Amino acid sequence: MRVTPVGETLTAIAETGSGELHLAIQGGGRQVSFDERERLFEPFFRLRGEGGQVQDSGLGLAIARSLVQLHGGRVWLESPVNGGNTFRLSLPIGEANASSGR
């Protein structure tokens, strides 16, 4: 998570419930505005780091969202006012995989 300052800890949480796998990656950093949260998953959109620097291509989250959606899931960012950020991902599990023999 590029919005998490260097040296801060990231926490990964995985749970199942309601026929879905839920993943969360929690980190620190500044609040990401609502507009930025929506645009963050658009191809080539990039957040500016400290000093206005851009460090990536802006494709990673767009590709991730596309892959998750192809599997019937969703991915989003939660960024509360008090700081810290959580990327969340939900994927369906169960019926579809059982019927395909996987």
Image (cartoon, helix red, strand yellow):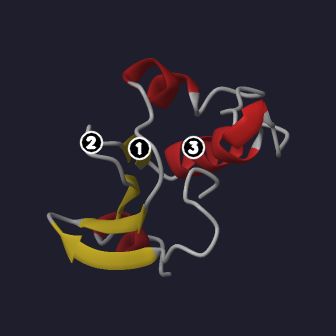
Query: On screen, 22 above or below 36?
Result: below
Badge 2 marks a residue whose secondary structure is: loop
Residue 65 is tagged as: 3
Q: In which quarter of the image is the N terminus?
A: bottom right
Residue 91: % across, % down: 39, 59
Amino acid residing under circle 2: Pro
Distance of label 3 from label 1 (alpha carbons): 11 Å
Residue 37: % across, % down: 46, 30
Residue 80 is tagged as: 2
Quadrant of the rendered structure where residue 20 is? bottom left
Q: Nearer the viewer, mark 2 or mark 3?
A: 2
**Could you tell whether 3 is left or right of 10 in the image?**
right
Discs 3, 1 touching: Cβ within 8 Å: no
Badge 1 marks a residue whose secondary structure is: strand
Residue 77 is tagged as: 1
90 and 60: which one is in front? 60
Discs 1, 2 touching: Cβ within 8 Å: no
Distance of label 1 from label 2 (alpha carbons): 10 Å
Residue 25: % across, % down: 43, 66
Question: Which residue is at 45% across, 44% downward?
Answer: 30
Q: Which of marks 1 and 2 is in front?
A: 2
